[in-house]
Image (cartoon, helix red, strand yellow):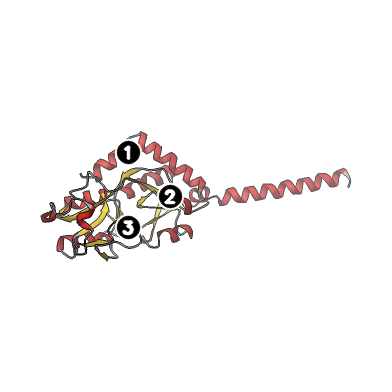
Amino acid sequence: MKRSGKITVLLILLLIIGGVFGYKAYNDPLNRIKRTGVIRVGTTGDYLPMSYYREDTEKYVGFDVELVQDLADDLGVETEYVKTSWPALMEDTLNGKFDIAICGITITEDRKETALMSDAYLENGKTILIRIEDIDKYKALDDINKEEVRVMVNPGGLNERFAREYLPQATLIIHENNAEIPFLIGDGEADVMITEIMEAAYYVTVDDRLAAPLISEPFTHGELGILLPKGYDSVLNYVNGFIERERENGRLDALATSYYFR
């Protein structure tokens, strides 16, 4: 092959390689978010005080909502919320229905293996929400793990998993709408709600029929993180850097003070 022919072939190969890398860079999730000016946020909208959809205003409110708005501002983009549910959360994440998911999601090894999870931005743990007249009745799991005790949880999440594993003798009631459960406990439709300390702390401040006697001694100790689809490594790295900045500038502490009422 003549020298000019070799140069032509080399140029063609370089153009192909450059095109492949250019295509990948163009379609990288983080670049796409910045290019389109929108980050799609998956959330259940049923978990006060983390993420809750208010039908009267048609807006999401909560700790996680403010945190996501900080993230969007940091990226220079708008937020677009995508409704999901606890049973469908992982499937929707893996199917790319949104770029990130945030709604009080506990970091677990299963979730880290199946998808991507950010660094922790808040500590949490399992506890109970009960009626205030029962405050001396339920002091340990053994007090709850009885057939006559009605335990209510939302489906598909760690609350249901916890109840099935640690309270097999209790009467388990599955209720679709997580945000309704605290008030159903107050109404006497069930005796105990398995929840997180953030949620329990919130509801005892808005319903004086309720109590969370074990809130300072949770059954488990966990951390909340942001869930992302596989292949979103560039977004994950950005999110982890953002969380660290929010921690260093005191924003995470400020949000915790605002939303977490012990």
Of callouts 3 and 1, the N-terminal one: 3
Where is the C terminus found, in terms of image quarters?
top left
Amino acid type, residue under disc 1 in the picture: Arg
- Which residue position holds label 1? 251
Q: Secondary structure at mark 2?
A: helix
Amino acid type, residue under disc 2 in the picture: Glu
Residue appearing at x 47%, y 46% in the figure: 236
Residue appearing at x 35%, y 34% in the figure: 249
The answer for how far apart the CA atoms under marks 2 and 1 are is 27 Å
Of callouts 2 and 1, the N-terminal one: 2
Which tag is nearer the camera, tag 3 or tag 1? 3
174 over 9 or under it: above or below: below
- Which residue position holds label 2? 109
Few, some or many C-alpha atoms within 10 Å of disc 2 (few <14, some 14-19, many ≥20)? few
Q: Nearer the viewer, residue 161 or 231?
A: 161
Q: Residue furthest top?
A: 248
- Which residue position holds label 3? 165
19 over 88 or under it: above or below: above
